[in-house]
Image (cartoon, grey):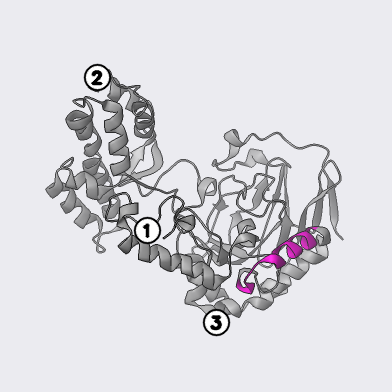
Amino acid sequence: MTRVIKLTELKECRDKDWLGRYSSHEDYDEVISDDTDVYLPDGTLVLVFRKTAIESLVDISTERYDYWRWVSLDSGSVNRGDAAGTEIVDNCENRLTKGQVSFFSAAKRGAHDSSSEKDIQSILNEDTRWALWHYSPKWVKEDGLVDVEAVEELERRFKDKTLSTKERKKAGEDLTVERGKWFSNWVTKHFLPASDRAAEAKRAEKRYFGSQSWNTCASNVVGALDRQAIIPWARLTSTTQKNWEGFTGEAPFFREVDALFKEHMPENHKFLYDRFQEVKDPRFNLFDTAFTTVTINNNFRTAYHRDKMNCKGGIAVLSAITQGTYEGFGLIFPQMRLAFDIRQGDFLCGDNQGYIHGQMPMENASPDAESIWFVFYSKERLRFVDDLDCELCRRDFRSYASKNHTDKGNGKPSWGGIWPNMWTSPE
């Protein structure tokens, strides 16, 4: 028998207070582990939970389990945003601090035209947390802002694969400190003596700032991805292409999930299915389902987040395959004060975009404990891209441009061939 929960109110959870932080046991009133439908105060069906509903996962073969384990670990992610936690704790060997990023922002406006070295250091000390931004080790070495010999020796040690985990951690810490001296050296040698400090700050930011990244996590994607700023073409993910046979062999699983979605939320399914019949290439439509893409997580405890990049008005489906034993690791919706114990073959369908969600910690886990989660969703912008062959032409043009249109670039050897308005340019 299916339990029905009719919510009478939703807890106020402001994004700035919740997104990126990890859950606690105080965030929910109960953990649901039986078939349940959840309705919002206005009567809208918002979540559907069914135990062991996905038969193709309940009795998954060893071969298929190993395929999904491989998928989940094939390519770790540094771009999961809030889900990976907003307190940055890894890949810090060439990160800027939040204080340094704030300094550059103010200095470009002329706010530090009369600041002394002591004033600047005082500002930096106000926020020493790691930022998303990385600086370029190559350019700080080339410009003599670090002891090159000392840094390169530490770089060699950090890359030494024979080091123990403890030794590598220490090598990373030492490298972080030695490389990090570049900033104070730049302030002393270039910023303070500059006749136009704002211009110098702009120059340095352009030269030294690199990419952004969040915490690393075991999270990967199969299916299609839309155009992005640094990869401006739609595509099938690299993991999808590496084992095409394994991916296409999972089509019955994808269709079973889609059929359950249609059964339990028919109006939502019709909205998405009809919407994604418009894609220009059937490979962008997950085997004629309402979905385009699946994220696969391996023992990745997500911090509170919203699935912001999904189709507007869309619905996500979650499930899992597991081994070993553990407690916790359920999915919490703090606005509803509910948590769901998602285990092998379970089916959770609902609005992951409109409502904040995140996971409990995994507790009392056996040495072999593993929880591989699936998140099915639809990428809105795939409706507006060209077919796959045409999209790959964009990839090829970017590669061509990086070698033949360097006059459009930023002057760095690492320039990737992308410039503003390139897709409407005569080139």
- Label of residue 116 in the image: 2
Residue drawn at the location 55% of the way across and 82% of the way down: 245
Instruction: Tell me: 403 left or right of 421.
Output: left
Q: Earlier in the sequence, mark 1 or mark 2?
A: 2
Instruction: Classify 260 as above or below 305.
Output: below
Instruction: Classify 360 as above or below 69.
Output: above
Instruction: Please tell me which residue lies in front, 72 or 389.
Output: 389
Q: How far apart are marks 3 and 1 (CA)?
A: 33 Å
Instruction: Classify 28 as above or below 217.
Output: above
Instruction: Please tell me which residue lies in front, 153 or 205.
Output: 205
Q: Residues within 10 Å of mark 3 (few under 14, many from 20)?
A: few
| Residue at the disc numbered 3 | 245
Q: Distance between the residues labelled 1 and 2?
A: 39 Å
Q: What residue type is labelled 2?
A: Ser
**Residue 264 highlighted magenta (yes or no):** no
Q: What residue type is labelled 1?
A: Gly
Q: How far across and how far down the image is residue 17, in percent? A: 59, 33
Residue drawn at the location 23% of the way across and 29% of the way down: 191
| Residue at the disc numbered 1 | 417
Instruction: Tell me: 220 left or right of 287.
Output: left
